Amino acid sequence: MTTRIRIDPDSAVPPYEQVRGQLARMIGDGRLPVGTRLPAVRQFAADLGLAVNTVARAYRELEGAGLVETRGRHGTVVAPGRDDATDRLHRAATEYAAEARRLGVPPDRALALVRAALSSS
């Protein structure tokens, strides 16, 4: 899997977010189907040349979004049970994030725009 994850050290996007975003896209488009076991945090960090805490944060954020679940000694796997609405919203969010990056909008500003849109609904 590490060959599919690319970290751009010159990017304004923090490394944990690069890992999280790439994994989220792979989950969202089915390249990582439900039940797929992700690499162990320590090994993945070593493979990517990142700190363990960087990969751990990416995994925590994916778990918080319901995309993966940690099963103790059995590792972290792509989570089952996302419904169609969640899948569609995840794809839209992934596209929004990609567009924000393409336009050079910082993540905190992009999130502020989403919060404003949600509160005005």
Image (tube, grey):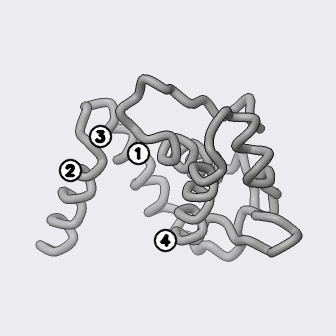
**Do tag 2 and tag 3 residues touch (Cβ < 8 Å)?**
yes
In the rendered image, residue 22, in percent from the top left (x then y), is placed at: 57, 42
Real-space Cα separation, disc 2 to disc 3, in angstroms? 9 Å
Q: Earlier in the sequence, mark 4 or mark 2?
A: 4
Instruction: Using the image, tell me which numbered label, if any, was put on residue 100.
Output: 3
Mark nearer the viewer, 2 or 3: 2
In the rendered image, residue 54, in percent from the top left (x then y), is placed at: 57, 49
Real-space Cα separation, disc 4 to disc 2, in angstroms? 25 Å
> Image quadrant of residue 72?
bottom right
Real-space Cα separation, disc 3 to disc 4, in angstroms? 22 Å
Question: In this picture, is 91 found above or below 85?
Answer: above
Real-space Cα separation, disc 3 to disc 1, in angstroms? 9 Å
Residue assigned mark 1? 95
Question: In this picture, is 43 found above or below 89?
Answer: above
Real-space Cα separation, disc 4 to disc 1, in angstroms? 15 Å
- What's the amino acid at mark 1? Glu
**Do tag 3 and tag 1 residues touch (Cβ < 8 Å)?**
no
- What's the amino acid at mark 4? Ala
Question: In this picture, is 66 found above or below 13?
Answer: below
Q: Residue most toward the top?
A: 10
